[in-house]
Every structure is written in structure tokens, then in C-alpha cells.
């Protein structure tokens, strides 16, 4: 399995069979990402919630890739379907399978609106995703969230991810202290910080986060860096 950070909360995961999954495709106006939507050709897009910095360029990317499928919550899937996008809506605990990857939606503690609309609209419950690859590698993308106890009792003890991708930016999500607690509860082999330094309001030093995490290895990828597991 290969993992690439595109800045903010956007990641690409690629399975051994070559299935490409794009998470939270905030690309065009993401100051941390040098790519354009036309540069991306995913098979699957997963969207954690409706905020513009996560919903991102999904419609444009989908129109450039007609065979693409979007996995998200029910409310966002309806919005996308009305905009001509092939989207599947699922909810907490449900999973779908594509080739050698099972994708499961789990909980997140956050808000979710289409805040890019003139009249801000409800965009369903925010979520997180667990990706289970055929080689038994499990990747947890927490989405935008605060700390909550199911990170220990459900995500950590039931699903046992090998890699946990956690927000550390504060203001809109967990701060570094809460994220380090989450890493301890989930107890993965690797933890990767996200949702930081995109804007001045979420400026953080990931090396300080690394010092706080004592139970697993912290990986701090550069934007567009690929890590192979």
C-alpha cells in the first residue's frame, strides 16, 4: 500500500492492485498543494464531511473521471448525485468493497455544512474512514474531529488500525495534546499528523507533536511525498 499526502487533509492511498483512493480532495485553492484537479485520476473519492476544505474539488475531478465513484455520507451523496456525480451514501459502521480494499465509515466529532453555498446548508453527519487492504494493512483517516472515547473503545479495540491519520491543527479540530492522546488510545504502528499549517490559524509544529507521541512511530511526510508500507 502507498500513501501520499496532498496537504491539509487530502491523501491518496493506492492498493497493491493499483486502486487509487483520494480522500478529502481540497486541491485547487489549497495553498499547500501544487497540483490541479486535472492532475488527479482516482478510482474512488472519500469525503468526510461537507466543509469546503474537505469537499473541495470533488465535482470537477469526477467530471474529468467519468468512471469514478464517491463514497460519503447519505446527504452529501444526494447533493453530488444532483450534480451528476456517481456517489454512494453510507453511514456509521457501514462498509463497501472495491477490488482489494474495504472502506468503512466511522464516527467523527465535528460539524458538517455546505459552507461554500450562499445559504449554508446541512451536509449530514461528519465521518471518518477505515480502509482495510487485502494485505491486512488498515488505515484510519480521522477526518475533522475532536477527541472522543470511541477512539479507544471502538477504533482502537475493535478495528485496530495500523496507521492513524489525525488532525493536529486546533481551532477546528483536536490540538496536538488531544491528538497525542488519541494516538495512545488507538495504538497504531504509525501515526501521521494532518490538518495543520495550511492557514495561519492552524499553524503547528509537527515535530512537537512527534515528541508527545510515545507509543508508536510518528511519520511527518512532505506534501506529495509517497510512503510505501
Image: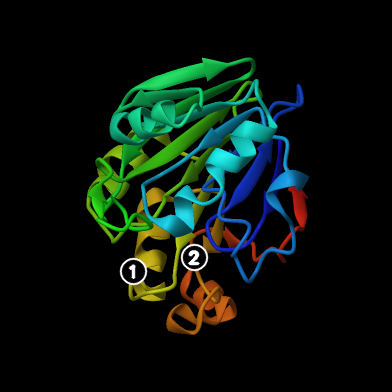
Residue appearing at x 30%, y 29% in the figure: 74
Callout 2 crowding tier (Cα within 10 Å): few <14, some 14–19, many ≥20? many
Quarter where residue 51 is shown: bottom left
Q: Considering only order in the chain, which callout, 2 or 1, is on the residue closer to the N terminus? A: 1
Residue appearing at x 25%, y 45% in the figure: 150
Residue 11, placed above or below residue 1: below
Q: CA distance from mark 1 to mark 2?
A: 9 Å
Q: Are marks 1 and 2 in contact (CB under 8 Å)?
A: yes
Which residue is at the far front? 118
Front residue of 68 and 153: 68
* Relative to 41, 205 lies left or right: left
Instruction: Write down the residue under mark 2.
Output: 195
Q: Is residue 228 visible?
A: no
Specify the color scheme: rainbow
Residue 55 x, y percent position in the rendering: 46, 48
Instruction: Write down the residue under mark 1.
Output: 172
Amino acid at each position: 500500500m502507498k500513501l501520499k499526502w496532498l496537504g491539509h487533509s487530502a491523501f491518496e492511498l493506492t492498493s497493491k492492485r493499483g486502486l487509487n483512493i483520494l480522500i478529502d480532495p481540497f486541491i485547487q485553492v489549497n495553498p499547500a498543494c501544487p497540483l490541479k484537479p486535472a492532475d488527479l485520476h482516482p478510482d474512488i473519492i472519500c469525503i468526510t464531511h461537507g466543509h469546503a476544505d474537505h469537499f473541495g474539488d470533488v465535482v470537477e475531478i469526477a467530471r474529468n473521471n467519468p468512471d469514478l465513484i464517491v463514497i460519503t455520507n447519505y446527504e452529501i451523496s444526494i447533493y453530488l448525485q444532483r450534480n451528476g456525480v456517481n456517489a454512494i451514501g453510507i453511514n456509521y459502521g457501514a462498509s463497501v468493497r472495491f477490488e482489494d480494499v474495504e472502506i468503512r465509515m466511522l464516527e467523527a466529532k465535528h460539524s458538517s455544512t455546505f459552507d461554500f453555498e450562499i445559504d449554508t446548508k446541512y451536509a449530514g453527519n461528519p465521518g471518518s474512514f477505515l480502509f482495510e487492504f487485502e494485505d491486512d494493512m488498515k488505515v484510519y483517516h480521522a477526518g475533522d474531529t475532536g477527541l472522543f472515547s470511541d477512539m479507544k473503545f471502538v477504533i482502537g479495540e475493535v478495528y485496530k488500525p495500523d496507521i492513524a491519520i489525525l488532525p493536529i491543527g486546533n481551532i477546528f479540530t483536536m490540538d496536538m495534546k488531544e491528538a497525542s492522546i488519541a494516538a495512545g488510545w488507538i495504538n497504531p504502528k504509525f501515526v501521521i499528523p494532518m490538518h495543520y499549517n495550511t492557514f495561519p490559524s492552524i499553524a503547528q509544529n509537527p515535530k512537537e507533536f512527534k515528541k508527545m507521541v510515545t507509543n508508536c512511530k510518528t511519520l511527518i511526510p512532505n506534501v506529495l511525498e509517497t510512503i510505501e508500507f
